């Protein structure tokens, strides 16, 4: 009888291990590309501690689509496909029924971290109720930004909240990243080389990407500064490549674009995956506090970022080869900063 008991105990142990390995988690992240990249350390921690079966991110797929297969994120799902707006309904106005697609959307997750809603809000209560209609799961709401001043990096702030709310015993986390958070595939690199070749640029020429834009004009270093850095780099044999997104195409005038074309090659209308490919086969990058800068840093290439009004100690990009320069000019977006120009060029040419 004892032999049969041992077999049953062993089987239970194997089933428990299999169930644990299958435990999956999800992060609801409604932010843009920079926010999504700064969430990756949280996703890594969840996989290492409570979600060995994988972690998905639910958000805007135009920003998230590059993550599966290139990062710790296993899959992405669209916020718009899940009718999450229903969760904002007030008390008495929210209902779910058996087989409701909203219930089924969360059926595979045992841990859910949400940057949507507020603690004790209708959204959080409705999310917890919805998830637990199908199974028992841990649901926690994380703040996207702290309510008061703090002196830790935002990615550590995310992880700290998760540790506190989940009551996990965890060692102190450090935001320093020794390895790239995002790894371009071989197909990405080949596509990046094709794009550069179409502009007459060979990766052996040390291409340096300059992205002079950002989501807010107040965070953009004056264009003349980037042009001066471009001339310094070109003088030392680097191939300068300016990168434009839709915002930059609208923001800069025709004369400004003409100056850019005179200082280097210009890439426009690239998809995020194509930008990833170009960055993956480039020597270095310089830009403002922007989503593309976070992407360059996460890829692991030499990245120089110029900060103005935002705090780099909190919002600095994560990567193994990041140099942060901070402007002391009161008019960051309008001042010509010769000292910073020289520092930026030196950091890229080191």
Image (cartoon, rainbow, N blue to C red):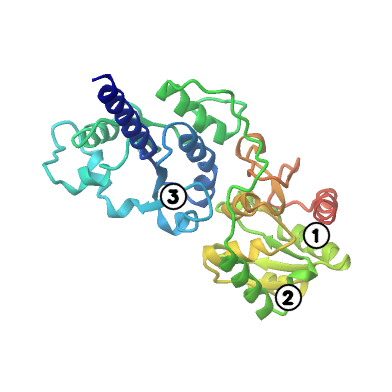
Could you tell whether 115 is left or right of 250 in the image? left
- Residue at the spot 74% in from the left edge and 70% down from the top edge: 203
Above or below: residue 63 compared with residue 189: above
Which residue was labeled with disc 1? Answer: 229
Tag 3, which secondary structure? loop
Q: Earlier in the sequence, mark 1 or mark 3?
A: 3
Estimate the spatial distance between the alpha carbons at disc 1 and disc 3, rounded to whole Å: 38 Å
Label 2, residues with CA under 10 Å away: few <14, some 14-19, many ≥20: some
Closer to the camera: disc 3 or disc 2?
A: 3
Residue 23 appearing in the image: yes
Estimate the spatial distance between the alpha carbons at disc 2 and disc 1, rounded to whole Å: 19 Å
Estimate the spatial distance between the alpha carbons at disc 3 and disc 2, rounded to whole Å: 34 Å
- Residue at the spot 25% in from the left edge and 25% down from the top edge: 4
Q: Earlier in the sequence, mark 3 or mark 2?
A: 3
Q: Nearer the viewer, residue 157 or 188?
A: 188
Label 1, residues with CA under 10 Å away: few <14, some 14-19, many ≥20: many
Closer to the camera: disc 1 or disc 3?
A: 3
Label 3, residues with CA under 10 Å away: few <14, some 14-19, many ≥20: some
Which residue was labeled with disc 3? Answer: 74
**Residue 92, quarter of picture:** top left
Which residue was labeled with disc 2? Answer: 201
Could you tell whether 197 is left or right of 95 in the image? right
Q: Position of residue 110 (x, y in %)?
A: 32, 35
Q: Position of residue 244 (x, y in %)?
A: 61, 66
């Amino acid at each position: 009888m004892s032999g049969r008991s041992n077999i049953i105990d062993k089987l239970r142990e194997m089933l428990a291990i299999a169930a644990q390995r299958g435990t999956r988690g999800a992060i609801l992240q409604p932010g843009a590309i920079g926010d999504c990249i700064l969430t990756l350390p949280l996703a890594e921690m969840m996989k290492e501690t409570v979600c060995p079966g994988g972690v998905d991110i639910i958000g805007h797929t135009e920003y998230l689509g590059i993550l599966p297969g290139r990062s710790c994120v296993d899959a992405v799902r669209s916020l718009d496909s899940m009718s999450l707006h229903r969760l904002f309904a007030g008390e008495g106005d929210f209902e779910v029924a058996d087989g409701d697609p909203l219930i089924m959307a969360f059926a595979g997750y045992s841990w859910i971290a949400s940057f949507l809603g507020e603690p004790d809000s209708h959204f959080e209560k409705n999310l917890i109720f919805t998830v637990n209609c199908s199974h028992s799961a841990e649901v926690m709401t994380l703040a996207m930004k702290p309510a008061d001043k703090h002196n830790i990096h935002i990615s550590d702030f995310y992880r700290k909240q998760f540790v506190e709310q989940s009551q996990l015993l965890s060692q102190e986390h450090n935001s320093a990243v020794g390895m790239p958070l995002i790894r371009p595939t071989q197909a990405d690199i080949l596509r990046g080389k094709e794009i550069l070749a179409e502009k007459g640029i060979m990766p052996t020429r040390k291409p340096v990407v300059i992205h002079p834009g950002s989501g807010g004009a107040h965070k953009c270093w004056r264009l003349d500064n980037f042009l001066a850095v471009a001339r310094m780099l070109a003088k030392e044999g680097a191939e300068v490549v300016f990168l434009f997104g839709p915002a930059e195409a609208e923001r800069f005038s025709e004369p400004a674009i003409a100056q850019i074309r005179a200082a280097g090659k210009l890439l426009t209308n690239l998809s995020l995956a194509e930008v990833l490919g170009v960055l993956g086969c480039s020597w270095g990058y310089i830009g403002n506090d922007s989503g593309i800068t976070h992407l360059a840093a996460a890829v692991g290439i030499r990245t120089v970022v110029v900060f103005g009004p935002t705090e780099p100690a909190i919002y600095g990009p994560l990567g193994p080869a990041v140099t942060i320069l901070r402007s002391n000019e009161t008019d960051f977006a309008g001042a010509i900063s010769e000292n910073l120009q020289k520092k930026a060029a030196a950091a890229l040419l080191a």
